[in-house]
Amino acid sequence: MSRAGAVLRRRVLPLVCLVALLAGCSVHVRKPTGVAAAHGGTVRLAVIPKAIGFDFWEQVRVGAECAAAERGNVNVYWDGVTSEDDVSGQQSLLQDSLAQGVQGLVYAATDAKALADVTRTAREQGTEVVNMDSGTTPQPPDVPVYATNNVQAAERGTQLLADQLGGRGKVAFIEFQPGTSTNETRAEGFFRGLARNPGLQLIARQSSNSDYNTALQVTQDILTANPDLNGIYAGNEPSVLGAAEAVRQAGKAGQVKIIGWDTSEGQVESLRDGVITGLIAQNPFKMGYRAVDAAVTKVRKEAAPPPSTDTGSTVVTKENMGTPEIQRLLNPSCANPPE
Amino acid sequence: MSEQSGSGGTSPDGRSGSSSEPGEGGTTTAAPPEGPLSGLTERMSGAISQVAAAGALIVVFVALSIAAPSFLTADNLFNLASQTSVNAVMAVGVTLVIITGGIDLSVGSVSALSGVLGVLLMADYGFDPLVGILGGLLVGAVAGLVNGLLVSVVGLPPFIATLGMLSVGRGLVLITTGAVAVFGAPESFRLLGQGVIGAVPIPLVLIVLVAVGGHLVLTRTRLGRYAYVMGSNSEAARLSGVPVRKHTTWVYVLSGMLAGLGGMIAASRINSGQPNFGEGLELDVIAAVVIGGASLLGGRGTVLGSLIGAFLVAVIRNGAVQLNIGTFYQNVLLGVIIWLAVWWDIYQRRKLAGESG
């Protein structure tokens, strides 16, 4: 009996497997099938930012929810990982959303190449995709991206720095995640600006790893090594905050010009105080709004969604920060949306 | 490992008062609870670790002073002290844990939790900075207590208990803040991380206080001596009557509390509680402790060594920025120095064991 059992295990089982295999179970990567069927008119959208926990993405959320409310019968599921470099975490989150059967996927890609697969999978199962802030490579022609033209905005910000320095001086660059597309496009615009202003001399380039404390430390160290530093260009919110804090603590507020990206509360405060001399403001509200609006249009198959657009950028200074347009941009709400 | 002794029933006396200072000073009689073999050999190899780390620190320090003219300036040394303070106070706590043969992976998350809750107490509830700081320490101590109970009572391996806390702590940070930074602490809170007493930065004072405190705990108290015993041979410690559970728990409480202090110093440096603070910080802290000569197997480590390790890590990062060396290279440099420090330690230890054995 037990011998027969052994024979069964050793001989027969593999044979059965082999036959079954030949009979047609091919080996492949399993694709989720999803449940994209419409749910009685209510459109269900997953809206996935690069990360939660930053002012910028909060404003994207306000815009997204505003569009959902205005269109009516739209449920927005907002979720995100906690760090913008957590590519695999975001990938899992996107896949989970697809498995839950949303009809539309609105997201900001933490990595252009790695997440192109998610877009493809989504479209294969009939889920509409729209990108905000950052798209994928390749970007399918009918997946619109609503994002800032980072290169152009960075170049404009750098020009302001050059103007504030009278066209000459030593500058430092605080980047945040070398290698990521946002970081590199903001660097590219900065270098174009430098090329147009040969009087500016780049003397240090250091990364904050998107951490406020690290930004503070590297800026302190740069200031120590270069007491004659004239200007700083910083690539995102924590980098700007850390650079400003270092300049403040060194007692060089206003003396070292700081131009940087984003417009969180703390940054705007430092702009008012004169520690920061210029902020490159994007329009996150508009990104969220446009992206959700387009996704609803696509899901309801009403019309072709509006094509990819630059959602625009503005350089905010102490002088123009009081104007109504800038105030709407800095504190967007559904009742009082920015242009 | 030179000290797997039989621990022949030298049950540490339970009564109070009597054994005042067998740790450092009393060289002659009164065999310390570590066991007969440990005395001279152990002390010599401990000294070797510190000498190696201190040597590396001096070499790097001198090299930087030559390479970067701005390195050896009052301003920069001030910066260095305050930049090191967060890692250094946390390293003292982790040293205690590592000596018992445990590990605390949660210090980064716990420091963030303390930072945001401490700032929240001041910003949203209007408490005095002193209350906010103590609140932050308390939060850290409670997180440490949970770690300690999970290890000592529930019986989870320290790696697992604190890995869980790493995740729970970060989760609680995000829940309480909605993942948005907490601003609005009073200006006087800046003193903790940015202030000076005379010409001495307060963070440096804190390093010294914590280090002296940690050193005294390790060398002058029962908790410290039992920590070495438990780390060398926890079974023998238990059999010889050391209340292992109680002391294990305390060690994690202290580590949590010091993580809380580190979190408050960091928050004070930027006058805000940042929810993403301290991600990966546990690795820098553990690196400092290991460079300072502590053994992850337990039973070995000193506060002074860990302090030197923390300064070495900070000096390398500080100097690299001044020389405008990119972050990627900084990471490689730091990793190589960890290898070298521990290799040197092992190499010297083998030589010593070969000579004495």
Image (cartoon, rainbow, N blue to C red):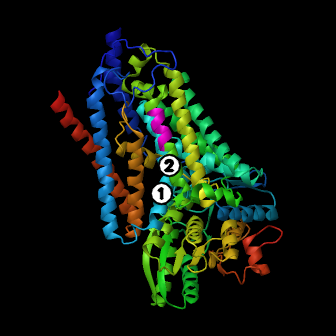
Vertical placement of residue A332 versus B176, above or below: below
Residue occupying the far top of the picture: A1
Specify the subunit that label 2 lies on.
B
Vertical placement of residue B26 versus A215, above or below: above
Q: Residue at x 22, y 40 (%)?
A: B348
Specify the subunit that label 1 lies on.
B
Instruction: Identify the image quadrant of residue A143.
Output: bottom right
- Coordinates of residue A229 in the picture (x, y in percent): 48, 79
Question: What amino acid is found at the position of numbered circle 1 in the picture?
Answer: Ala
Q: Quadrant where the N terminus of chain A lies?
A: top left
- Coordinates of residue A241 in the picture (x, y in percent): 60, 67
- Coordinates of residue B167 in the picture (x, y in percent): 56, 41
- Residue identifier under label 2: B207
Whether residue B298 sits left or right of residue A310 in the image: it is left
Q: Residue at x 57, y 27 (%)?
A: B149
- Residue identifier under label 1: B81
Residue B93 is one of the magenta-drawn residues: no
Distance between the alpha carbons at the discs numbered 2 and 1: 9 Å
In terms of sequence position, does the residue under pointer 2 or pointer 1 come before the other?
Answer: 1
Residue B212 is one of the magenta-drawn residues: yes
Please tell me which residue lies in front, A192 or B56: B56
Residue occupying the far right of the picture: A335
- Coordinates of residue B275 in the picture (x, y in percent): 62, 53
Please tell me which residue lies in front, B166 or B301: B301
Q: Which residues are magenta?
A: B211-218
Pointers 2 and 1 in contact (C-beta within 8 Å): yes
